[in-house]
Amino acid sequence: MPLLNIYTAATSIATPLLERLLKKRLAQGKEKAERLSERRGMATVERPDGDLIWLHAASVGESLSVLPLIKRLNKEHAAASLLVTSGTVTSANLLADLLPEGVIHQFVPLDQPRWVASFLDYWKPSLGLWVESEFWPNLLRQANARNIPLALLNARISEKSFQRWSRAKSLSGSLLKCFDFCLAQDQLQADRLSKLGVKSVKSVGNLKFAGQHLNVDPDELSQFQRKIKGRPVWMAASTHAGEELAAIEVHKELQKQHRDLLTVIVPRHPERADDVKADLRQARLKFSSWSKTKVPHPSDQVFLVDTLGDLPFFCALSPICFMGGSMNVGAGGHNIVEPARLSSALVYGPDMGNFAMLSEAFVNQGAALQVRDTSELVDAVDNLLIDEEARTKQIASALGLAAEETKVLDAVYDELRPLLAKASIEPKIGSTRG
């Protein structure tokens, strides 16, 4: 019996376990009580008439990466409705603020066959666009069985996942062949996915760098800068557990030479703020937080950004940005184009596996510095604080590379045109590229 059939049978009889899982997640604040039925495939809003484009993004990062494409589709295919699904409360809250008017958000159903069927029977997507690397077997197979054209966008697969899937090529091939085609983040990802059985795969760039507007209020930024009165600033962005400790060590070393140094820490997951505060207290550093004070006190050594969605503001504020997820914490790095576009000099650790080709290009072009450990991070930040000419040159190189990456949205949209035509989704009359 094929593995996928075993999986389908197992998830069919696992309903009581899935119900208990939902109850547990609800108690933990990981589900919304008023929308829990969506996780069972039952809609909480009415489906509009006509064609419907369905985009699935697992969580916050995927949702943000596909937002420029959502806006493009909403503009150029106004006759079609757009449905966006995701699996986390955080992403739902973020999308509630960012999605264009009329675009629908629903939680993706858990991968129970009956719940998946209920979801697909109700929404009847004309086309499905999945983002990055979340593969739900029942949802994919049932969509494929209904002849819904499917594309995998901004696809990536880590080296660890690639090795694991390579040992089960019949399984990976059965899932990945559900997609009509795949657009990978870079050529390395494209090669991996091709080896795993994707029918048609190519790379046209990373949608995370698709040129979405980075909303930074210049008046608010100027006001913040006036209040910190010219203090030297550097930022540790999108940090994971352990990387805040590295940032603390950097601050303690550098404050000897840079007495007014302000270190900004932006955890990848704001819910970890209490843990970071405990680390700061343990280090006996004075700090305040964005959610409480909106500006650091003159005596603060560290400013903690404990909210979601404010990273662009602090990229624009900080002339130096260490990008977290890169100090061997298993995250594979994070988006380096956003701080580059906001003129922040980039530093990152040894693990940029999710952005391997791009991060290598940045280093080779003098647009970023890559360090091996905290000691090298101390030296890199110190040099960038001292040498304004070197910092300016590095920022200029990064801006040039980032500008090239922002062309990716046009390339992705052009690749989608045949699939949109296959699904009989016509562009709005008079629509243009842009």
Image (cartoon, rainbow, N blue to C red):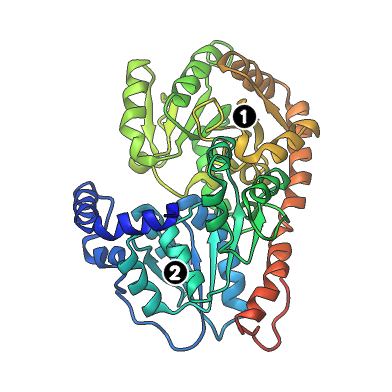
Quarter of the figure with residue 87: bottom left
Quadrant housing the N terminus = bottom left
Report crowding for label 2: few under 14, some 14 to 19, many 20 or more residues within 10 A (C-alpha).
Answer: some
Question: Label 1 is placed on what type of residue?
Answer: Tyr
141 vs 224, nearest the viewer: 141
x, y percent for residue 317: 57, 40
111 vs 289, nearest the viewer: 111
Residue 87 is at least partly visible in this image: no
Q: Is residue 57 above or below residue 324?
A: below
Residue appearing at x 39%, y 82% in the figure: 47
Label 1: element kind? strand
Query: Which residue position holds label 2?
Result: 142
Label 2: element kind? helix
Residue appearing at x 30%, y 32% in the figure: 274
Quadrant housing the C terminus = bottom right
Residue appearing at x 37%, y 67% in the figure: 106
Query: Which residue position holds label 1?
Result: 348
User: How far apart are the alpha carbons under marks 2 and 1?
Assistant: 41 Å
x, y percent for residue 326: 56, 30
